[in-house]
Image: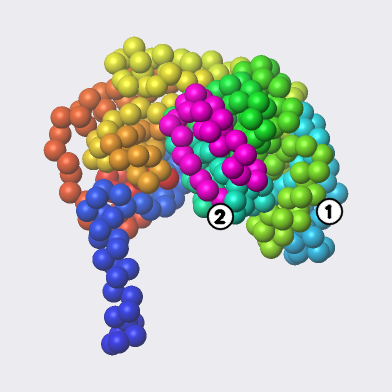
Amino acid sequence: MTGDSGRVWNWLERDLEALARQDRLRNTRRTSGTGTHILLDGIRVLNLCSNDYLGLTRHPDVVAAALEATKEHGTGTASSRLIAGTNPLHEAFEATIAKHKQADSALVFGSGTLANLGAIPALAGQGDLILSDALNHASIVDGCRMSRATVEVYPHKDHEAVVQRLEAAEGQHRRILVVTDGLFSMDGDLADLGGLRAACRENGAMLYVDDAHATGVLGTGGRGSFEHLDVSPEGCIQMGTMSKALGSEGGFVAGPAPLRDVLLNRARPFIFSTAPSPATMAAAAAALAVVGREPERRRRLLTNADLLRRALADLGLSVPAGVGPILPVILGSEQAAMRTMHDLLEQGIYAAAIRPPTVPPGACRIRLTVQSGHDSEELEAAAHTIAKAASAADGKAPRGASVAAAQTTSRATTPTTQGGP
Ligand SMILES: *Cc1c(COP(=O)(O)O)cnc(C)c1O
């Protein structure tokens, strides 16, 4: 652009430069596949970044179901669910996922993010109170903002703080919603669902649990955090996604019988968005069937996660206690996290550096996710490589970053300032 019409956009470059100066510039990377090994910018790496925990994006039954559905129903739905977009696959999946979650009804959204942006404002609005865990997923934070309810953030997993707040708030709000991740997406630890559920019951509050990462993964039947903790989900709302262990995409919200109809009347990201594709729904349904049929995938995943968690801790790394496939290695600064990621890449390991605003300043980390298909010896070896890279990054001075470097999408493994989410 030239002349005056271009000047109005000068701030775009300045904005990117500001991010680069803070080591917070992000970019996409060219990857192929979702498996235990992928090509990253053309180079084969061990993939410790995928949420395809059970390897279901490539499961023959899941792939076949998506192809079948496409042949029968076409590639797209061409309408919102409320006009002409609902086909039998949507309703069948909703019934199945509701049953799987031991809920009375469920509604599917185009993504997990849309589910939170839609459901939270449908459940709480002006005059209501939302209590939200400090480490909740960004889509919960945004859903809370969009609700126009009074939002109070409580310290991470501080069930006592919730109890106190609920007791103090008695009679002052139309409705109260307590919202939490089940398995926290950046820390890999579990909410105290038993305590929260009891507190909500006692004080007439609603409990909403985002179980994106535990769905298909935790519990003997793969039903999620409630099952793992042996807490009944009855009377609670369970949100989840088909985009992680279920190898597809989309989100759902499950709960009491009238919930589905309330959401489909009130949740704007449901009402004003095109229905998910037939392939998406069929893949998710097939994946859910595999979750039930092949529990050994879940067992292997958890064995792998335990192995890596223990190996990293034995090597002296700061890995918070947790359960399941998400393992953060806390490093502190942006520079330490970025440098570790770059060093690992050079050694053929892809692990995402996570920086603010995804995590609080000073809590930058490498976030590892394991898969059921990972080889245990390879994970052991990776732990040693990670420990070395992390300790090397610790003592070194920050490396300068430039916008130009970060914008390159060359095939080189040369470190750039690209990062994870
Ligand atoms: C991934 C994730 C989401 C968003 O799901 P998408 O299907 O990727 O939009 C929501 N909540 C949590 C806790 C997540 O980890």
Quarter assignment of residue 314:
top left
Q: Residues within 10 Å of mark 2 (few under 14, many from 20)?
A: some
The relative height of residue 5 versus residue 24 in the rendered view (above or below) is: below
Magenta range:
147-176
Q: Which mark is residue 148?
A: 2
Q: Is mark 1 within 8 Å of ligand 1?
A: no
Q: CA distance from mark 2 to mark 1?
A: 33 Å
The relative height of residue 37 versus residue 87 in the rendered view (above or below) is: above
SS assignment at label 2: loop
User: What residue is shown at x 28% (from left), y 55% (from top)?
Assistant: 19
SS assignment at label 1: loop
Amino acid under disc 1: Asn
Q: Residue furthest right?
A: 88
User: What residue is shown at x 32% (from left), y 58% (from top)?
Assistant: 407
For label 1, the residue is 87
Amino acid under disc 2: Arg
Residue 370 visible in rendering:
no
Quadrant location, the C terminus = top left
Horizontal relation, residue 419 to residue 264: left or right:
left
